[in-house]
Image: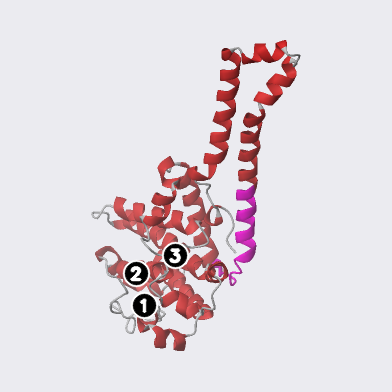
Amino acid sequence: MCAGPINQIKPTLSSYIPSLLSTAAGVMAFVVLHFSGAMGAAAAYGFSATAIIALTGLPLLAGVLGALLLLSKSAKEIASIQQNTRAKPYSDVGREALEVAEQRLAKYSRNTPWWRSLPFFSKELIWPRLRPPVNKGIYELTYLYKDICRSLNPNLSGEAAIEALDLLIKIAYAISALTLDDLEPFKAELQAEWTNTQMLTDQGFYQYKTFYVLPTVYHNAKNTPVVREISGSFYESGTRPGQWRALYNDYCDRVRAYASEEDLLRSDARHVNWTQKDQDMENFRLFPGTQPT
């Protein structure tokens, strides 16, 4: 199972509003009481300065305690997600891709603008009107993936293009593989008797989009001019394209570990068409057909 930033829940700004308001109220109460002369009047009635400060500081203390409780709650949520995500074992190539995604995501998260943590921007702009994942790290990976796609230079060639594709494919693998791992926690949160096949193919949930991220990147990569020049190396061990093929085939196997091919064919054959393993150059379909929109 993947640990670290991929499974991390980032507290949103809205989650801190209660403690921030309470803290601000405490400060304002102390300032108003101090400058209004109320503290002096209270002292005249026999209240000690210590008691007055303690009473007026209670809202401030409540705000601090509230912030600590929220941080503690976030830590428990992260741990809970990691325990409940009963991921099937990853291959060596899969674990390596997840590690790369984690490292890049950790660096990306530190540079993410504060407004990205607002609920509206962190959810609705990626998958409007779709029920979101339990694993909130999938949001961050999707933002990272989209930003990388936008920043790719179409004129890249040679090793620079290979490096860019290598990162993109590993991020895509993380998104799609973690989508499968998120199925059980998602169903538990939904509290409904859905099968994995139904969750993957129903267009009321985010899974039907993230399911296709890696297959789309892989098929597109094999169709790019710079990759077509080295297409033979996809079937050679130890090459970068050979690692991409291993990742893609690994994902195809993982899909069938969560949902049978027969069930997927009955529900939506496109899921099967786009996850046919790449066994050889002659039989691999570069254009598997349409995808759900």
> How many C-alpha atoms fall within 10 Å of the one at disc 2: few (<14), some, or many (≥20)?
some
User: On the image, numbered disc 1 is attached to which residue?
Assistant: 274
Q: Are marks 2 and 1 in contact (CB under 8 Å)?
A: yes
Q: Circle 2 — which element?
A: helix
Q: CA distance from mark 3 to mark 2?
A: 22 Å
Q: Is residue 215 above or below residue 104?
A: below
> How many C-alpha atoms fall within 10 Å of the one at disc 3: few (<14), some, or many (≥20)?
some
150 relative to 139 in the view: left or right: left
Q: Does the segment drawn in magenta span residue 229?
A: no
* Stretch of the chain drawn in magenta: 73-92
Q: Are marks 3 and 1 in contact (CB under 8 Å)?
A: no
Q: Earlier in the sequence, mark 3 or mark 2?
A: 3
In which quadrant of the rendered image does the N terminus lie? Answer: bottom right
Q: Is residue 277 above or below residue 25?
A: below
What residue type is disc 2 on?
A: Thr
Of tags 3 and 2, which is closer to the observer? 3
Q: CA distance from mark 2 to mark 1?
A: 8 Å
Where residue 65 sits in the image (x, y, percent)?
Answer: 66, 37
What residue type is disc 3 on?
A: Arg
Write down the quadrant of residue 165 in the picture. Answer: bottom left
Q: Circle 1 — which element?
A: loop
What residue type is disc 1 on?
A: Trp
- Closest to the observer, 255 or 245: 255
> How many C-alpha atoms fall within 10 Å of the one at disc 1: few (<14), some, or many (≥20)?
many
Where residue 262 sits in the image (x, y, percent)?
Answer: 45, 89
User: On the image, numbered disc 2 is attached to which residue?
Assistant: 216
Which residue: 48% across, 63% down? 133
